[in-house]
Amino acid sequence: METEMVVHEGGCHCKNIRWRVKAPSSVVAWSCNCSNCSMRGNTHFIVLAERFQLLSDFEQFLTTYSFGTHTAKHTFCKVCGITSFYRPRSNSDGVAITFRCVDPGTLAHVEIKYHDGQNWEALHSQSGIALQSKVQTLQNIG
């Protein structure tokens, strides 16, 4: 089964942050138990950074939080507090899209997998999450 690539749009709750991303209509979203993701309840799918585009005049509304290794850049809206996307530690070449922030109508299926972020160092390479921003993986999802 070949997965259709579509354009998804989405953003934060107050709509001050808006973006567009090209990704399959069926995605694998990751539910992580790291300290940040578990507190926010964030479940996200990952795309190549080049397939992500901010649409709005967002600078005045966007802020970033970083901790630990400071590799991940957790972006969120200063007005409503929603993290609709961020730069994940697991995929430095990608963008993590909060699947619940995608506008209705373009996601046909979301498969949720679990990533043990509490044991990131030991288990990261085994989870498969790092492969999600690789071109060959995106073309062969199905």
Image (tube, rainbow, N blue to C red):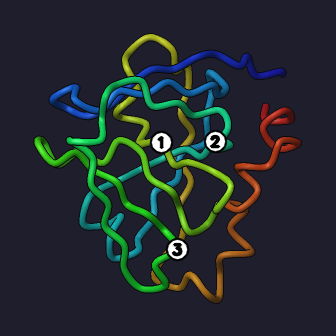
Could you tell me how far apart the alpha carbons at marks 2 and 3 are, in whole angstroms?
17 Å
Residue at 22% in and 25% down: 15
Marks 2,3: beta carbons within 8 A: no
Residue 37 on image: x %, y %? 36, 64
Badge 2 is on which residue? 47
Say which mark, if any, is on residue 53.
none
Q: Position of residue 47 (x, y in %)?
A: 63, 41
- Residue position marked by numbered label 3 in the rendering: 71
**Quarter of the figure with the C terminus:** top right
Callouts 1 and 2 close, C-beta under 8 Å: yes
- Give the mark toward the camera: 1 or 3: 3
Left or right: residue 113 compared with residue 140: left
Crowdedness of circle 1 by 10 Å Cα count: few (<14), some, many (20+)? many
Give the structural element (helix, strand or loop) at label 3: loop
Q: Circle 1 — which element?
A: strand
Q: Give the spatial CA distance, label 1 vs label 2.
A: 8 Å
Disc 3 marks which amino acid? Thr
Looking at marks 1 and 3 on the same chain, the residue that comes earlier in the sequence is marked by: 3
Q: Is residue 121 left or right of residue 107?
A: right
Q: Is residue 122 above or below residue 76?
A: below
Q: Nearer the viewer, residue 130 or 76?
A: 76
The amino acid marked with disc number 1 is: Ile
- Earlier sequence position, callout 1 versus callout 2: 2
* Identity of the residue drawn at 67% across and 26% down: 24
Res 141 → quadrant: top right
Q: Nearer the viewer, mark 2 or mark 3?
A: 3
Residue behind mark 1: 97
